[in-house]
Amino acid sequence: MTHPPRAVRLLLAALPLPVAVLLYGYTVRLPFFLDDGPNFHFVRHIDGLEQWAGSVAFDYYRPLPFSVWKLGEIALGGHSPAAMHLLNVLCFGLAGVLLGLVARRLAPGAPTHKTLAGTIAGLAFVTFPFNYQAVTLVSGLFHLLFALGLALCMWLALRWLDGRGGALTLVACWIAAFAAAFSHENAPLIAPLVAGVAAVAWRENRAPLARVAWAVVPPALIAGLYTLLWFTVPRTHAGEDLIWSQGVRLSLAQLSQGLAYPAVAVAGLFVDGQTVEATRVLLLVAAVVAPVVIWVAWRSLAAGVVVTFGVAWYVLALIPAALFLGADYVLGSPRLMLVASLGGGLAWGVAGAAIVRATRALRGRRRWMLWGPLAALPLIIALNFLTMRRHDFLHLGAFSWRLYDLLGAADIAGQDVLIVNSPNYLAPKEPTFLLGAEGATFMLNELGYEQPYWLNTGRDFPEANVDALAYRQTIKYFSRTYAPYRAFVEGPELIARLGAASRLFTTQFDGARFLPVYSGGANLPGADAPLVRFDAVGLAITELEAAFSPARQVVTIHARWRLDQPAPVKYFMHAFCNGELVGQADGYVWNDLYPFSAWQPGDIQTDIRELWLTGSATPDCLHLLTGVYWEANAERLAAIDAATGAEYANGLVPIPLARVTDDLIPFPPGE
């Protein structure tokens, strides 16, 4: 059979790269997050070379990524989250391209069959759903450089073994092995995997053993050198102890499910993923994979050898994580499947091509009735899963960018700052797969905002006392599981910490979105004389004005409240445009954190409330109103103009629109 046209072969070989960009190009809009702060703080204080000798400032020995990041810092004059995210996407896509080339070389059969195997393998890798975490997390470069270096080493080794490359190809193969080894602790995997690729290829090319040794032994020695250094260079050991317990089986089950993820996802429709026993997941994966391997081997021994090697690669790559990491960590770290998924892509690429080859006698509808579901099911599951993660990451990224802008605009230097209900991670209500975490994580409870602020803004964090907490009653995000940053607090402790905050930032929820807002602060200066009285409860408004942002379609209301005695009441604020309600808020001050029933007698506090408008309002059409009502029956309290003694009709107090500005904080705390 003739080769496919060269242009077609090149296009199919390169296809994983643009697909990776399409799937993950959105990450260039994300900030640095999670442990990017500590990692890039380390980058900031090294010259890019010293970490090769080890450092007690970093738990692991992964020197190459830090050199890459340092070069980026020097070249860009700082840290660019867009550039670092793009680097991850390109490394990921190129690893998919190289895996496709390896699969095309190892797959038996005609050129068309080989091309198809390579295309499926590369696309299977870049669409593998569990790889999302390694790509979206900038610090996933540790894993990505290992995967890229390993795939490049294998491809170059195959070219050398086939006699298609000279000494430069061989040296490049060693350099790729070096890059992989010094990027991650998975380095010991290089020796058996490169030897395995050479052994599979040897069945066809019968390369001289001396030539095989030149391709296999130096990468193995490089991996051995890294392992020796890992045990000897100065570093902070992170407690890597073997775990001989139920944790190993659970970790293996979580990691192995990726090899048969379409079947695992379908099973998840009928089973509560939180109660699935690890052994059942392992049996399910085996029940899917084993028959495929046997059938392929029965059809073609050569293809069966490649598929078996791919499955063995997948399993072998899981063992270090299963043995050396706790099950809780593994369940929350799907990026640990990245290297394994290279083997899985190889196995399914060759198996998929074998299925197509076996059914070539079918014609028309019968062929597509077989091929269609086999190709569509994994793609539908993967794309749906990755689309959800995209939504979550972009939402968290928008929150983070706005929070940094708010902190910069609020003059927090020397202040007591409290951040309430900022997100730790988002997760689906119902998981797609049987085991493991599937959400998007941005902030870990043990890390603070100082390093992410510096890293994303390029400015050192102001000297301020920054505190954070979560308040369960005001979390109103129901489309996902919303896990907040830091612990839940309520009762007297909540009131005490609110009362100590001179700058208060809260998370405001509105249906399918949430964003941070500036909500005022405790004991801010302001007027004490009443403008509006609610005599039934001894409540008064002493300051009242609003600002409107046409660009953001947001009304910000500044109100200062004085209360003689605690009272079970709420306020409401409504925005109308030409008589149509376009925005509203009901509750308490500080984004519903401080009920009037919990106030101290004579308490006076300033509240900043944002109304997110639903229409295209203009300053001329806006009509803003506020008032107070009893919690028990929603009956409005009479509102009295303190200057004239006149009662406002229906308890509706007009709010003057004092400013039209697109400033993020239209009422700065220093005013």
Image: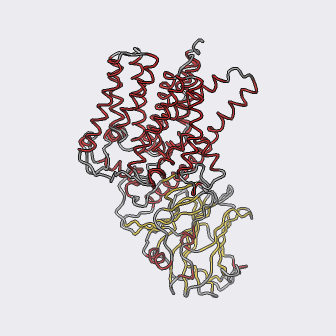
Q: Position of residue 490 (x, y in %)?
A: 50, 75
Identify the residue at the far right of this view. Answer: 365
Is 248 above or below relative to 118? below
The answer to whether residue 17 of the structure is visible from this angle is: no
Residue at the location (74% across, 64% down)? Answer: 579
Q: Who is closer to the viewer here, 182 or 600?
A: 182
Residue at the location (57% across, 49% down)? Answer: 280
Is 335 above or below relative to 518? above
Q: Is residue 593 left or right of residue 486?
A: right
Residue at the location (68% across, 30% down)? Answer: 371
The answer to whether residue 660 of the structure is visible from this angle is: yes
Is 632 above or below relative to 515? below
| Quarter of the rendering containing residue 553 | bottom right
Q: Position of residue 164 (x, y in %)?
A: 41, 15
| Quarter of the rendering containing residue 227 | top left
Q: Who is closer to the viewer here, 466 or 612?
A: 466
